[in-house]
Amino acid sequence: MSDDSCFHTPSQALQWKQFLDNIPVGAQKCKNDEYFTMLDMNQGFLSMTGYDKEEIQSVFHGRYLEMIHPEDRQNAINIIRSQLLSGNQIEAEYRIRCKNGALRWVLDKGNLIPDENGQSVFCCALTDITALHETREQLRLSLERHKILLDQTNDIIFERDLRNDTITYSSNWESKFGYEPIQQKIKTIVPKYSRVHPEDRSAFIGLMRKLGSGAPVAAAEFRMKDAEGKYIWCRVRAANQFDDQGRVVKAIGVITDIDEEKRMIENLRKKAERDPLTGLLDKITLASQIESFVSSNPDVQCAFFMVDIDNFKTLNDTKGHLFGDAVLAELSGGIRRAVRASDLVGRIGGDEFAVFLKDVPSESFCNQKAEQLLLFCQNLLRGQKQSANISCSIGIALFPSHGRTFQRLYECADIALYQAKRRGKNRTSVFCQNMCLTETSETGFSGHEISEIPKRRPLFSGLVEYVFRMLYSAADIGEAISAVLEVIGKHFDVSRVYIFQNASDNLTTTNTFEWCADGVEPVKDQMQNLPCDMVGDYAANFDLSGVFYCKDVAALPDAQRELMESQDICSMLQCALKQDGIIKGFVGFDECTGQRFWTQEEISTLTFLSEILSIFLFRC
């Protein structure tokens, strides 16, 4: 700079000046006074700020302090004065004002030294760190955003370091489980982790092995115990990170609480497997559970009962169907109470029940149990205001002596039931080999025909269960939902079945799935990102049960009617998709051939199917 006293010749001073002007940083010398009055600066400083020396003098009065952004001045002064208490070196970051109005972040590194007159002056080098500071700020904001997101979610984020054999977790682990997680010696401790449900340990170990073997991604669902001993269903998804040699170094993943979802699915599964009137297992589920038990216990003696109410049609005709339903409900409850909790009870027809007794000691034990059921049925309505003579007949087949499959046991018990009916009803009969499989009575009663157990598409009473199983076992939920819409559409013989899903802000809605019958024009492509209020308050059409039933679209408000007519809709039924009690879309059923009347049973079935669909839609 202009202090040339340390150079022996003018040529050396000139060379030093040229060096300062060519270094890629700004340099300036200023007094150690209250304004940091500037004594000299290099070309790099002038290029950085855009000012020349005369402008710095006229605009800032030669005071470097005035070039520093007002918001940063006091902080810069405090840092410099504090550093001078322990030495002569200073380092500070602040913004300086440039001629074009921009602000530049600079790193100021310098020394306080005496000049030729013994006065203290600062000799400083200033590096432009604007880009670095902006990167830092973006990183800070990004980290802050991630923290906000983590604070807003119940998901637990974890990172496993394979080299150090450690796992770190986001801070919400303890709030979820109530204890500190294992973070060290993962390979040794985690495989023996006692807080994973014993039934789910294989899924847990499988996840760890898959990640450890180098799979790019892995996922599993299992239950983990919290501090109070309650098991919580969790879904764990993780992805491996690799080094430049292709070796796994880290795994990053998310632990999601799916306990409520799992319980809802389990409740839906149980509802789908049971007869709605009696709460007993339906025929398909009963058959499946019996097949599962006998295949695992081929040498355990069991008994299969067919229980049929005598003259039930006459009872319905004389007392009414509501009375008949009450009898069925009462009888089913009595059968359930008469057997052990481990035994299986199902309703397999209008007035027919089946009982599967596991591990029976003898045939006489079965006869005693059957007599108890006969007696219960005889006393079912005795002493009540609206009395009736009720009785039942029971056919019994034994496993494995009479059959080793549900199909064979069903046939044998049905033959035995026929024998009980032929001998006067209100009695039991055990199958024996000399009974004729095709025998018929003079009254026209014959053994019940039964086809092979449906494996693909049970209809009507089995539709709900079938749909649930399709979705629950699907590898690709999207493909499964499309297949389900086709099954429902063909089963109920409608023109079009579709799903609308709202955006997260509930401001727009989109037709995400659609099935059309032959000859019906698809409209899915025209129904994308529609404003939810395009035709008024559409959600107001749904009743408290989440159903919008319109027998004739001509009765709708003009805007809604025009929208429906543009899709050739004459009549429709829509069932709301709800999440946390809020309508987030709907499943729709259009009739384009004319007006249609929907029965209450059909509406109830479709509402239940929509509820099942909502679980799997919001899960993916």
Image: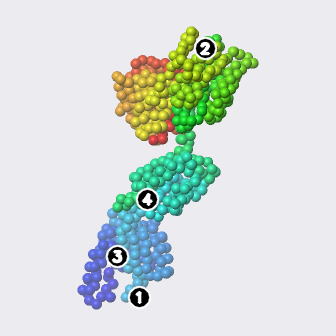
Q: Which quadrant holds the C terminus?
A: top left
Horizontal side of residue 412 vs 520, given as left or right: right
Alpha-carbon span between mark 2 and mark 3 = 115 Å
Callout 2 amino acid: Arg
Q: Nearer the viewer, mark 2 or mark 3?
A: 2
Horizontal side of residue 9 vs 241, given as left or right: left
Mark 4 vs mark 1: which is more N-terminal? Answer: 1
Q: Nearer the viewer, mark 2 or mark 1?
A: 2
Q: Residue furthest front?
A: 434
Callout 3 amino acid: Ala
31 to 514, vertically: above or below: below
Looking at the rendered structure, the secondary structure element under dot 4 is: strand
Disc number for residue 250: 4
Mark 4 vs mark 3: which is more N-terminal? Answer: 3
For disc 1, the marked residue is 118
For disc 2, the marked residue is 422
Residue 542 is situated, as x and y percent measured from the top left of the image, at 52, 29
Horizontal side of residue 185 vs 107, given as left or right: right
Mark 2 vs mark 3: which is more N-terminal? Answer: 3
Alpha-carbon span between mark 2 and mark 1 = 130 Å
Callout 1 amino acid: Gly
Looking at the rendered structure, the secondary structure element under dot 1 is: loop
Mark 2 vs mark 4: which is more N-terminal? Answer: 4
Alpha-carbon span between mark 4 and mark 1 = 60 Å
